[in-house]
Each structure stands twice: as structure tokens, then as C-alpha cells.
């Protein structure tokens, strides 16, 4: 008994010293207008006045224990020596720690300007639920038993009538905070995330809850690297629970975890002893058989209900397991002032999905503008349109197609109907398929991909620009060059690819091995010319032609993309005497 008493006394001394230092530091940097509510009022003691309306959490109880006396063990180490309870208390259960770090990584990608440290999630998770009640979670990160805050019936806490029909908190009359990060149902509906990729958004899952808490803390474009008094870090913490004691406690754990912590097995964490309402949880996590330094079960006598008539299962009485967390983030307080920023989600944070909104067929001929345009719509979880959201459209793939202005990406803000329409795309000269991708700027939501097709320029008709006969004497050059004009559906077919070949016969399109020929760059005879192209007026003028010593009548065939074909007769003969 003496040993236990000594350990308690030492913890109390450390708590007092750390708290005093933290409060002193906050005294000069206090966010303007933030005031504490006396502990008995926050706890909902008998006869206490209702919590102030600008409380973001309903002033529910939270754990006030501060870090242990011994120096933190680096993340790669293991606790050695010293007070085993303190060593375990300072560690973070493996799955819970993994969830915090994965949330940090996700936010670093989707909201890099927020600079969210995983240690902040760990500090809040410690204060709200004792790290998911000492890491009592399954392999997927879901708590073995639901963690519920007190009933928010206005009796010492905020009064929030049921918003989820009991779906999350099993209470169809009032709301209760849920899960390891203690979200109330209405707030969860706004900030819910799927942190473990199982396709579900569960407030009782530490991966989902940690990622949601990260998004909540990053609301209003906060930069959590701003740790000045009244800066974004303090504002974010105060938006979770509007109390300087809460702020002090979270900041103290944040500093502790930054100095180094260690991983402990799931289910071996020590549930905190002290809460802001003076109560204690009725159970502690079970020890691991044969484990060194594991806490012993220490059931305590249920504390006396502070509000008569609430001491029943699910009532949120402090003696109920899991009721130690605060209510977590709530809907924005009215008249909260600049000291506690409105946590109302930005339009971007409200977006739950990106949907197609009537995109037309994306096809065009090379060099032409696409008639169809990509149109998308940003929607909330309930399916309503979300305006003022930035949507990025990007051209992806091996293509020279470009948006108006010659860019490969463009950002468009959604209208009042939640729609964003991509700029017109102009096809380049490269034919084939590419992708137009739409994504929400600032969110890691699945994007939408659209296939766009560029067809080569075409001609469906070819005609000579004159009707002169094409003749020459063997061993000389033709006096005239062949000139043709291409059209497509009666219009000029400009920049259309063409091929010219001295064919063997009308029925044999292979290149002839005798008769007229062209010359290549080295002056050598060639009887097929590729990579020809009509000019801006659809005209193609072939190079000079030459005849070998073989007299006869020959055929020149010109073909274009699109199927246009023209056969021209060439005669090689000695002049008539």
C-alpha cells in the first residue's frame, strides 16, 4: 500500500509542476477572451450552472493526467527500469500509434499547409479516451467495446438532441460523443473519414477517427506549425474543448510525445486515473499474462453520480466505462469570437465525392477544338451540391492536346449548383487517346477520368489543280509537277497526311521498280513518298519527277488519311518525229 501511495504522490507532484509551468507559459499567450469554467461547473456537479453556449464540447469530462516523471523512451526503444506503470503510461499502443502516423502522412499529402504532427493526435487521443482505452482495439483498429461520452441532455453538459437516430451512440433522445477521438454524431457526419481503406467510416475505428480528427484540426486553412499564443495550434485545440485547462493538458502531452515515446502492445496501456470531473473509470485494461510491467486490474468504487437520475447504463455517468472522454468537436459555437475559430468545415472539407454532371463525348479531329467538355459536380455526404470548391482538370498522357491558353491543367471553382466545367480542349496533331482527369483541390478523394480521342485530319476527296498532261522523254525530268487539293465534306482539308506512290498497276498498289521516280535528299531514285501533308489551303504539290530509260505509261497514286485517293497517269515516250 505504501508503494502505491508513493507512486501516486510522485505522479501528483510531477503533474503539479508540469501544469504550473504550462499555465505560466499560457498566461502571457492566452488566446483573447478564453476563460476557464470552474471544475465543478465543467463536471456538471449538482447545482452547477449550465455550460456556456460557446463551449465546443459541451464541457464533458476528459482525462487530466499529465505525463509520467521518467524521461520518454525514444520511438525505437523499449521502456527499461524505473516505474513500470509510468513507462507503460508513457507508451502508445501499437495500432493506435500506427493510426496517428498514417493520419499525419495522409494530411501531409492532402493538406500540406496544415503541418499536422501525429503527436498532436496522440495528445488529444490521450486526453479524450486514454489512447482508445489503452489500445483495446481489434486488428483493424476498431475498439473492442464502444467508447461513449456522457448523455448530452443539458444536465451539466451541452444539450444536443438526437441527430443520428441512435446510429452511432445508441441514444435516440440525445447525442453522445463516440469513439477514441470522441466525435458527436453530427460532427462525425461532416468530418468522417475512411482511414484504413476498408470502405467504411466508423467513429469507433482509430484509423478512421484519427484521420477525421486531423481534418477537423486542419479546418479553416489552419497552419498548426503556428504555436504562438493565440496561433492556429492553440485555436485548433480550443476548438476541440474550449477550456484553458484542456489546452494546457493537450499541449503538455504534445511536448512529451515530441521528446520521444515508445510503442507498447495493444491492450496494455494504462487507463488514466484523473478526470476533469474528479471521477475515475470503473475498470482498467486487463494485463497481458506474464507481461512485464503490465497494469493490474484495479476496479474502483463507482463515483457518486453528480447528477441524480443519470446513474444507469448508457447514462454517461462518470463511473461508466468509456465515459471519460470529452464530447470532442461539435458544430460551431455561436458568438465564439476570434479566440476560438469557427470549426465550420470549409466547402472543400464538405465535399464527399465528385460526380459526373453531363460530360459530352470527347472526340475531335487533329487541330480542332473538342465539342464536348468535361462537367463534374461536387457533392456532400448527403448528396447536396457544394459551391466554391476548386476542381482541377488535367490532361494526362502522350498527347499535344491543350486547354485554351496552351496549358495542360486548369482549376475551376464550382458554381452555386456545385458544377465545374473544364475549359475547351484543342486537339494537337498527335492522334490517339489521352485522359482528362478531374480532382478536388485540397482533398484526397477519388478523381474522375475521361477518355478523349483525337482523330487524324482527314480528306474524302482529292483533285488536281490543273489538267495538263504529264509526259517526258526517257532519261529526262517531267516539265510539270503534280499538284492536288484535298477536301473533307466539301471543305478544305488542311494539314492532312498523304502518301504518293508510283504503283505497279491499277490493281497492284505496290511500288513499281521501273519508270518515273522521285529523288531523295541524296539524289537517289525513290518511288514512294511518305509523311507528305497538305498546306493550310489543302493543297499538296509533289516534288519533281524523273523518268528512267524505260518508255511506257505509268500510274502515280496519291492517298490521304480518311480514304481519299487519286490516280494520275504519267507517260514516258520519245517525241514524235
Image (cartoon, grey):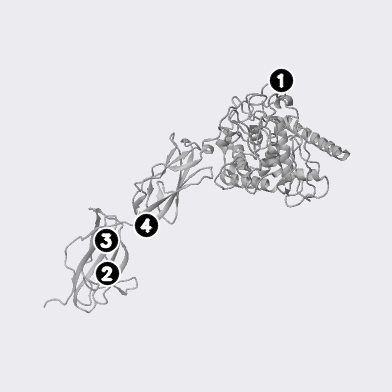
Helix or strand or loop: what does disc 4 sit on?
loop
CA–CA distance between discs 2 and 4? 24 Å
- Circle 2 sits on which residue? 501
C-alpha span from label 2 to label 1: 102 Å
Q: Is residue 299 visible?
A: yes
Question: Where the N terminus falls, by quadrant?
Answer: top right
Tell me: residue 301, above or below residue 286.
above
In the picture as drawn, the residue positioned furthest to the left comes out as: 577
What's the distance in space between the residues labelled 1 and 4, CA to CA?
78 Å
Q: Let me know if residue 36 appears in the view.
A: no
Foreground: disc 3 or disc 2: 3
Q: Which residue is mark 1?
A: 47
Q: Earlier in the sequence, mark 3 or mark 2?
A: 2
Viewer-proximal residue among 186 and 21? 186
Say what secondary structure mark 1 lies in.
Answer: loop
Q: Position of residue 37 (x, y in %)?
A: 71, 25
For label 4, the residue is: 431
Q: Residue furthest front?
A: 312
Viewer-closest of 570 and 262: 262
Q: Which residue is mark 3?
A: 563
Above-or-below relation of 461 to 256: below
Quick one: label 2 or label 1, which is nearer the N terminus? 1
Nearer-N-terminus badge (4/3)? 4
In front: label 2 or label 4: 4
Q: CA distance from mark 4 to mark 3?
A: 16 Å
SS assignment at label 2: strand
Amino acid at each position: 500500500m505504501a508503494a502505491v501511495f508513493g507512486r501516486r504522490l510522485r505522479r501528483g507532484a510531477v503533474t503539479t509542476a508540469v501544469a504550473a509551468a504550462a499555465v505560466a507559459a499560457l498566461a502571457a499567450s492566452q488566446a483573447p477572451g478564453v476563460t476557464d469554467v470552474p471544475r465543478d461547473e465543467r463536471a456538471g456537479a449538482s447545482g452547477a450552472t449550465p455550460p456556456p453556449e460557446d463551449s465546443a464540447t459541451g464541457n464533458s469530462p476528459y482525462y487530466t493526467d499529465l505525463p509520467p516523471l521518467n524521461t520518454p523512451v525514444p520511438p525505437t526503444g523499449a521502456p527499461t527500469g524505473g516505474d513500470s506503470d509510468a513507462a507503460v503510461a508513457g507508451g502508445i499502443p501499437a495500432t493506435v500509434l500506427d493510426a496517428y502516423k498514417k493520419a499525419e502522412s495522409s494530411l501531409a499529402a492532402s493538406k500540406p499547409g496544415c503541418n499536422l504532427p501525429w503527436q498532436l493526435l496522440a495528445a488529444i487521443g490521450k486526453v479524450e479516451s486514454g489512447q482508445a482505452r489503452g489500445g483495446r482495439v481489434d486488428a483493424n483498429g476498431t475498439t473492442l467495446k464502444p467508447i461513449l461520452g456522457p448523455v448530452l441532455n443539458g444536465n451539466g453538459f451541452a444539450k444536443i438532441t438526437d441527430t443520428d437516430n441512435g446510429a452511432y451512440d445508441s441514444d435516440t433522445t440525445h447525442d453522445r460523443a463516440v469513439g477514441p477521438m470522441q466525435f458527436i454524431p453530427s460532427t462525425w457526419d461532416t468530418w468522417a473519414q475512411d482511414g484504413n481503406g476498408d470502405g467504411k467510416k466508423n467513429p469507433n475505428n482509430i484509423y478512421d477517427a484519427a484521420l477525421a480528427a486531423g481534418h477537423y484540426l486542419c479546418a479553416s486553412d489552419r497552419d498548426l506549425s503556428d504555436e504562438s499564443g493565440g496561433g492556429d495550434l492553440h485555436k485548433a485545440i480550443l476548438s476541440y474543448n474550449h477550456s484553458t485547462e484542456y489546452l494546457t493538458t493537450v499541449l503538455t502531452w504534445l511536448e512529451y510525445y515530441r521528446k520521444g515515446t515508445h510503442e507498447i502492445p495493444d491492450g496494455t496501456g494504462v487507463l488514466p486515473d484523473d478526470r476533469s470531473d474528479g471521477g475515475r473509470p470503473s475498470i482498467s485494461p486487463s494485463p497481458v499474462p506474464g507481461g512485464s510491467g503490465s497494469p493490474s486490474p484495479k476496479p474502483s468504487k463507482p463515483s457518486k453520480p453528480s447528477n441524480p437520475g443519470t446513474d444507469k447504463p448508457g447514462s454517461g455517468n462518470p463511473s461508466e466505462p468509456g465515459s471519460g472522454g470529452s464530447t470532442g468537436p461539435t458544430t460551431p459555437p455561436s458568438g465564439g469570437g476570434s479566440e476560438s475559430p469557427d470549426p465550420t468545415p470549409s466547402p472543400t472539407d464538405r465535399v464527399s465525392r465528385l460526380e459526373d454532371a453531363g460530360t459530352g463525348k470527347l472526340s475531335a479531329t487533329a487541330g480542332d477544338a473538342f465539342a464536348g467538355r468535361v462537367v463534374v459536380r461536387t457533392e456532400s455526404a448527403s448528396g447536396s451540391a457544394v459551391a466554391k470548391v476548386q476542381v482541377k482538370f488535367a490532361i494526362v498522357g502522350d498527347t499535344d492536346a491543350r486547354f485554351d491558353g496552351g496549358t495542360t491543367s486548369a482549376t475551376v471553382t464550382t458554381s452555386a449548383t456545385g458544377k465545374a466545367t473544364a475549359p475547351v480542349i484543342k486537339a494537337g496533331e498527335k492522334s490517339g487517346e489521352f485522359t482528362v482527369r478531374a480532382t478536388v483541390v485540397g482533398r484526397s478523394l477519388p478523381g474522375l477520368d475521361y477518355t478523349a480521342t483525337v482523330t487524324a485530319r482527314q480528306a474524302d476527296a482529292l483533285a488536281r489543280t490543273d489538267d495538263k498532261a504529264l509526259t517526258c522523254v526517257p532519261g529526262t525530268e517531267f516539265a510539270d509537277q503534280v499538284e492536288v487539293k484535298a477536301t473533307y465534306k466539301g471543305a478544305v482539308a488542311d494539314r492532312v497526311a498523304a502518301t504518293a506512290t508510283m504503283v505497279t498497276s491499277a490493281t497492284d498498289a505496290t511500288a513499281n521498280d521501273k519508270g518515273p521516280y522521285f529523288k531523295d535528299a541524296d539524289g537517289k531514285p525513290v518511288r514512294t513518298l511518305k509523311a507528305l501533308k497538305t498546306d493550310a489551303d489543302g493543297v499538296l504539290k509533289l516534288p519533281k519527277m524523273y523518268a528512267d530509260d524505260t518508255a511506257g505509261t505509268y500510274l502515280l497514286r496519291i492517298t490521304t488519311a480518311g480514304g481519299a485517293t487519286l490516280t494520275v497517269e504519267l507517260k514516258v515516250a520519245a517525241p514524235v518525229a
